[in-house]
Amino acid sequence: MKKVNEHFFMKNRIRIFFVLACIIMVCSGFFFLTSYYKVTEVEVTGNEHYTKEEIQEMILKGGLSGNSLFLALKYHDRDISDVPFIESMSVEVVSSHSIKITVYEKALAGCVAYLGKYMYFDREGIVVESASAATPGIPQITGLSYGYVVLYEKLPVEDEEIFKEILSMTQLLDKYEINADKMHFDKSGNMTLYFGEAKAALGTKENIDQKVMQLSHILPELEGKSGVLHMEDYEEGTERVSFKPE
């Protein structure tokens, strides 16, 4: 009986030792992963609407979010549905303590004001975001006729070709690093850009690239001024530009 008890005790002691060894190995592995892959350096690219600090706060919060391996797995080919203006984000492990966050923002052409909100639409005219404040760098479009605005549906305008013109103009403004507050279209297709109290009347899309390029040189002189810069008839190599104060 004594030998049976000793055998039983030895057998249980081996089991206990094995379980303890497994626990120690798991804890050691967990400690290694959480300490060795702890994020201390972050690089953020592709962000315009949010600062680096805001992006970090979105990514590095809660639980294992400070672990580079966990983040790389979590944000692998993952769309973002709960952050305005962002389509997706990816995390690349640069080193054990360093990650690179790449932000892919939604391609926005402009926005319209509707019921106290700014409704942002993409190149197809589909309303993709709603915000209570205007976003710098994305012009507010005025002069369009629509009876209603529904999120995730196309803006119901009479001529959908206007969206191509808006996108083309937005890209031109980006090309020449111009930030317009508003972009107005009248019924004849004439375009006016607003910069604070100053306006640039560009007329139709004829010679629009030359007009915008020339505008980029003139804008610094209009800072703080109120009036209209007439560029309707501007052609490359001419001096048909006049500013009328208001």
Image: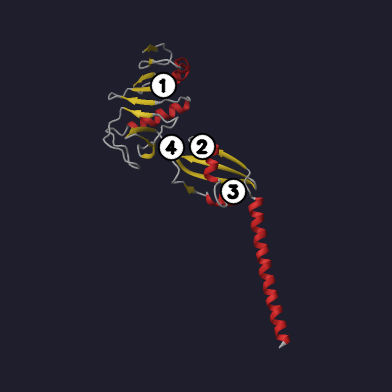
Percent of width and height locating residue 65: 56, 49
C-alpha separation, residue under disc 3 versus residue under disc 2: 20 Å
Q: How many C-alpha atoms fall within 10 Å of the one at disc 1: few (<14), some, or many (≥20)?
A: some
Horizontal side, residue 27 vs residue 127: left or right: right
Q: Position of residue 84 (x, y in %)?
A: 43, 41
Of the numbered discs 4 and 2, the one sitting upstream in the chain is 2
Q: Which circle marks residue 107 in the picture?
A: 4
In which quadrant of the rendered view does residue 154 lie? top left
Whole-angstrom CA distance, mark 2 to mark 1, is 25 Å
Instruction: Report the disc number at residue 47.
Output: 2
Residue 196: assigned label: 1
**Secondary structure of residue under mark 1:** loop
Helix, strand or loop for disc 3: loop
Q: Quadrant of residue 144?
A: top left
- Amino acid bearing label 1: Gly
Name of the residue lying farthest toward the bottom: 1
Give me the residue at 53% from left, 51% from top: 74
Q: Which of disc 2 and disc 3 is earlier in sequence?
A: 2
